[in-house]
Amino acid sequence: MSGDEVTSVFKDRWSAYQWLVENNLMGLREILVAARSFIQDRYKDSSVTLTDFGCGNSLLIPELTHSVQLDYYFGIDLAENALSMAQRLLESNRIKYRQFCQDLFLGMPQVSCSSDLIYSAFAVHHGDEQQKRQFFSNLYQQVSGECSFVLADIMIHEGQSFNDYTNIMEQYFVGQGVRSDWLPHIMTHIRQYDYPETEDSWLDIVRSSGWNVVCKQSVGPVEAFPAIFMILDR
Ligand SMILES: C[S@@+](CC[C@H](N)C(=O)[O-])C[C@H]1O[C@@H](n2cnc3c(N)ncnc32)[C@H](O)[C@@H]1O
């Protein structure tokens, strides 16, 4: 499985993903509130350089960072179309940025090793368990001791089958009015390329890579497939 295959649905059908975000079908608004509250508190007295893994079109970044002094923003994604959209947004919000069109599982680009904060929302689940472990472990070694990590991603309940998880999600999407011409593409992508972890598995992956979990909560609009929100410290 290549990063390009995984990101094809985002390259071809960004508007479908955008619709899910705008209608808060994945709970990104709740994640924004939780992440912003942490960022405001942690960086109220200092500036911050932020690296975003699987940034997409960086839609929430201006809102996430508007109350702190953002020195630099680094966005990593393989979907060029999303990166172009992000450019316009970042420029109109006068955010200094640099983008990397590369596989997020390659880890921190050299230039952004001085990041104070790593952020990743709904992207790391595109790697299997081994890739996730490698990713967190590499980052732990690449960044400085002051760096924190805000992670939001999909979660599956203990004992729930992947089949059951995707079927419930599909019914939810139908009920929420996802367009019928989008639905098969979205569900094919999810069934092929999503690797949700249970809460225990996420915790084990990040902790065994060296990260300390300073906050963990379950967020999202649907109990059947909550997202995990974690703040990690070195
Ligand atoms: C569900 S979207 C999330 C976008 C954004 N973080 C947000 O919260 O709206 C997942 C993003 O991860 C990107 N992505 C998935 N796998 C990737 C990989 N291996 N390398 C780089 N980007 C990847 C996709 O292109 C897409 O933009």
Image: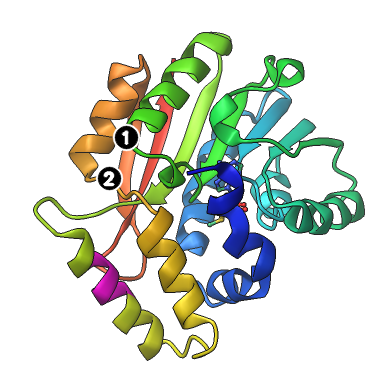
The image shows residue 53 at horizontal and vertical percentages of 60, 38
Q: Sequence order check: which comes first, mark 1 or mark 2? A: 1
Say which of 184 and 139 sits in front. Answer: 184
Residue at image mark 1: 129
Secondary structure mostly taken by the magenta-highlighted segment of the chain: helix
Horizontal side of 58 relative to 39 (left or right) equals right
Residue 212 is labelled as none
> Is ligand 1 closer than 8 angstroms to the Cβ of mark 2?
no
The image shows residue 104 at horizontal and vertical percentages of 59, 35
Quarter of the image for the C terminus: give it. Answer: top left
The residue under the point 54% across, 77% down is 23
Query: Is disc 1 surrounded by few (<14), some (14 to 19) or many (20+) residues within 10 Å?
Result: some
* Residue placed furthest toward the front: 1
Say which of 18 and 126 sits in front. Answer: 126
Q: Which residues are magenta?
A: 165-169
Residue at image mark 2: 197
Describe the colour scheme in one phrase: rainbow
The image shows residue 158 at horizontal and vertical percentages of 12, 50
Q: Tell us which disc is closer to us: 1 or 2.
A: 1
Verify whether residue 193 appears in magenta.
no
Q: Is residue 230 visible?
A: yes
The image shows residue 12 at horizontal and vertical percentages of 67, 68
- Location of residue 122 with respect to 146 vertically, above or below: below
Query: Is disc 2 surrounded by few (<14), some (14 to 19) or many (20+) residues within 10 Å?
Result: many
| CB atoms of marks 1 and 2 within 8 Å | yes
Q: Is residue 42 visible?
A: no
- Location of residue 213 with respect to 34 vertically, above or below: above
Q: Tag 1: residue type?
A: Glu
Q: For numbered disc 2, what is the local secondary structure? A: loop
Horizontal side of 82 relative to 224 (left or right) equals right
Q: Tag 2: residue type?
A: Glu
Verify whether residue 167 appears in magenta.
yes
